[in-house]
């Protein structure tokens, strides 16, 4: 984040936003956030916590039941077109016109955001090149993979030089190289003064990219702050990651003293534990007793996921 | 105009229209396949006119309604609505470009009809404009329906419910010589002017003048287009 950002008016400010879906009762309640120019702000929370709903409100797709927000000084409820013009948006499930080429899709959106012809051509060519899509820019989008579609959505969100970027799960489905390219571009944009709101459960990404982050739980902000500050609140927690050759019934390991939670992720079992002598040995013994064949084991420092677990007693990502 | 670089909503629709080659071929051929045999067959004028009217109504209603609901389901229309483009302008462009593209589909068949049944240039103009008015009206109905459903199948159902009384009023099959309230109501349905114009083209005089066909449907369509554009904020909003 650029120095002195806190002294400048926020690029995006939302006050007491509430929006509940009548059908499910889910949504967001009384959420307030403020994002300064040049700041990257992370929104984290499990599925159904309200991240996408909040982004839908902030993108002017749906109106809040109550609360106000403004973007670059423009009222989000009364000056929607002005707000939309200053915003770059990537929705959680990006869609495109499949029978048009990638470049035609991006060009259409760039012009819709008011870019002139020559500028649009130049910027889009650079972005297609940057995201390794240049080779496919004249292919129809219906031939694109999921990740290519996500990259195209990123290009569409960034091309017109928005003041505020709203990105919903932007790197989900991107290959490693593209994730790095995306993160690098976000850092460059932030350095140039763009405010970025990033809804993501990619813990590593939020930790490395975001200046501040907020946790949403059941529609409410349960904590916010810098990643460092949030993580410092869970000193005394260990994360043991065991990669197993075979899946095991891990219920008995969860009973080991000091183990707070067990989360399976692919072939990994992730143990959120208290920091106490012998905890690693006890967990390993528990896994072996349960019939697990450990092929890799690591003990990691606490991360934002541990913060969320501590705050809510629930996991960020779905448990099996 | 570069179709590979659409810089407006309507140009995007034109680009999509020409990008699906097989669909384009079918779209261009089916009006010819239906209308030309009718025009060449010596069928009674009132039935030949009805066939052309019904083809135009179906092409317009289902074209706009289905493509809109498909785009709504995809989420792409809501994404477009989140750009700074005016929603009213988007809906107007949807309406205008769909009506024009529908006319492009019908024009080859109409030209063959005019060749087989030569009439004055004024009547050719009046009949073509009446067909266009029918397409605009049908597209308005399709867009109106898309306000209430995001299912293409529902479009068919709702369209049938709306079109049946309008087709009846227009006198394509029944109500050919209406009186009283039915006559007054018929005057407000643009399809009726298509019916009269095409009957004239096929050699059956109706008493409706070319000037009436040029003016009344134009006014009615302008009102309908204005009304349907007012639904833009609802049409383009995110559906639950």
Image (cartoon, coloured by chain):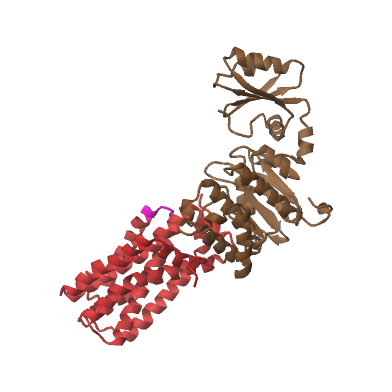
Chain colours: A brown, B red
Q: Is residue B77 left or right of residue A214?
A: left
| Residue at the limit of the structure toward the front, as seen here | A135
Residue A64 appears anywhere in the view: no
| Residue B150, placed above or below residue B123 | above
Q: Nearer the viewer, residue B144 or A90?
A: A90
- Image position, residue B143 (x, y; %): 43, 63
Q: Quadrant of residue B159?
A: bottom left
User: Which residue is located at x 66 percent, y 45 percent?
Assistant: A180
Instruction: Write the start and end of the magenta stretch as one range.
Output: B148-154
- Image position, residue A110 (x, y; %): 59, 63
User: Which residue is located at x 28 percent, y 79 percent?
Assistant: B197
User: Is residue B152 on the magenta stretch?
Assistant: yes
User: Is residue B115 on the magenta stretch?
Assistant: no
Q: Is residue A236 left or right of residue B229?
A: right
- Image position, residue A170 (x, y; %): 61, 47
Q: Is residue B237 left or right of residue B209?
A: right
Q: So how many labels did they put on this image?
A: 0
| Residue B16, placed above or below residue B202 | above
Q: Quadrant of residue A206?
A: top right
- Image position, residue A297 (x, y; %): 66, 23
Residue B158 appears anywhere in the view: yes
User: Which residue is located at x 23 percent, y 78 percent?
Assistant: B199
| Residue at the limit of the structure toward the top, as seen here | A289
């Amino acid at each position: 984040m650029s120095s002195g950002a806190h002294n400048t008016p926020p690029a995006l400010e939302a006050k007491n936003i509430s929006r509940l879906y009548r059908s499910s009762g889910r949504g967001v309640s009384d959420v307030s956030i403020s994002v300064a120019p040049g700041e990257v702000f992370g929104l984290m929370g499990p599925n159904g916590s309200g991240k996408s709903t909040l982004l839908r409100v902030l993108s002017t797709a749906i109106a809040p039941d109550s609360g106000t927000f403004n973007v670059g000084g423009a009222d989000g409820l009364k000056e929607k077109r002005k707000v939309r013009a200053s915003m770059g948006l990537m929705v959680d499930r990006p869609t495109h016109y499949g029978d048009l080429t990638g470049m035609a899709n991006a060009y259409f959106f760039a012009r819709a955001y008011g870019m002139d012809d020559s500028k649009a051509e130049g910027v889009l060519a650079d972005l297609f090149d940057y995201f390794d899509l240049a080779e496919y820019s004249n292919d129809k989008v219906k031939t694109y993979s999921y990740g290519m579609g996500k990259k195209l959505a990123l290009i569409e969100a960034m091309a017109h030089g928005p003041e505020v970027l709203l990105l919903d799960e932007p790197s989900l489905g991107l290959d490693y190289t593209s994730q790095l390219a995306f993160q690098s571009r976000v850092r460059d944009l932030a350095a140039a003064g763009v405010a970025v709101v990033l809804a993501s459960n990619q813990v590593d990404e939020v930790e490395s990219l975001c200046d501040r982050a907020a946790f949403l739980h059941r529609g409410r902000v349960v904590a916010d702050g810098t990643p460092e500050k949030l993580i410092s609140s869970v000193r005394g927690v260990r994360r043991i990651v065991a990669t197993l050759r075979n899946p095991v019934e891990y219920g008995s390991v969860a009973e080991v003293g000091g183990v707070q939670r067990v989360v399976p992720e692919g072939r990994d079992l992730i143990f959120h534990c208290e920091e106490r002598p012998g905890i690693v040995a006890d967990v390993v013994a528990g896994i072996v007793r349960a019939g697990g064949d450990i092929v890799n084991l690591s003990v990691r420092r606490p991360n934002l996921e541990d913060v969320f677990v501590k705050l809510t007693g629930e996991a960020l990502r779905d448990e099996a | 105009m570069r179709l590979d670089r659409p810089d407006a909503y309507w140009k995007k629709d034109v680009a999509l229209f020409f990008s699906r080659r097989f669909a384009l071929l079918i779209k261009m051929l089916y009006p010819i396949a239906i209308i030309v045999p009718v025009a060449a067959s010596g069928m009674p004028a009132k039935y030949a006119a009805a066939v052309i009217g019904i083809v135009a109504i179906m092409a317009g209603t289902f074209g706009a309604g289905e493509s809109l609901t498909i785009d709504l389901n995809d989420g792409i229309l809501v994404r477009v609505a989140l750009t700074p483009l005016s929603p009213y302008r988007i809906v107007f462009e949807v309406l205008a470009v769909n009506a024009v593209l529908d006319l492009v589909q019908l024009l080859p068949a109409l030209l063959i009809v005019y060749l087989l049944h030569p009439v004055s240039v004024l009547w050719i103009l009046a009949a073509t404009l009446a067909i266009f008015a029918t397409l605009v009206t049908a597209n308005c109905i399709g867009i109106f329906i898309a306000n209430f459903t995001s299912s293409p199948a529902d479009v068919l159902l709702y369209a049938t419910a709306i079109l049946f009384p309008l087709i009846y009023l227009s006198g394509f099959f029944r109500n050919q010589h209406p009186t009283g309230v039915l006559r007054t109501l018929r005057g407000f349905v643009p399809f009726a002017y298509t019916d009269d114009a095409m009957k004239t083209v096929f050699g059956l005089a109706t008493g409706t003048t070319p000037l009436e066909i040029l003016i009344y449907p134009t006014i009615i369509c302008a009102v309908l287009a204005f009304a349907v554009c007012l639904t833009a904020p609802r049409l383009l909003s995110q559906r639950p």
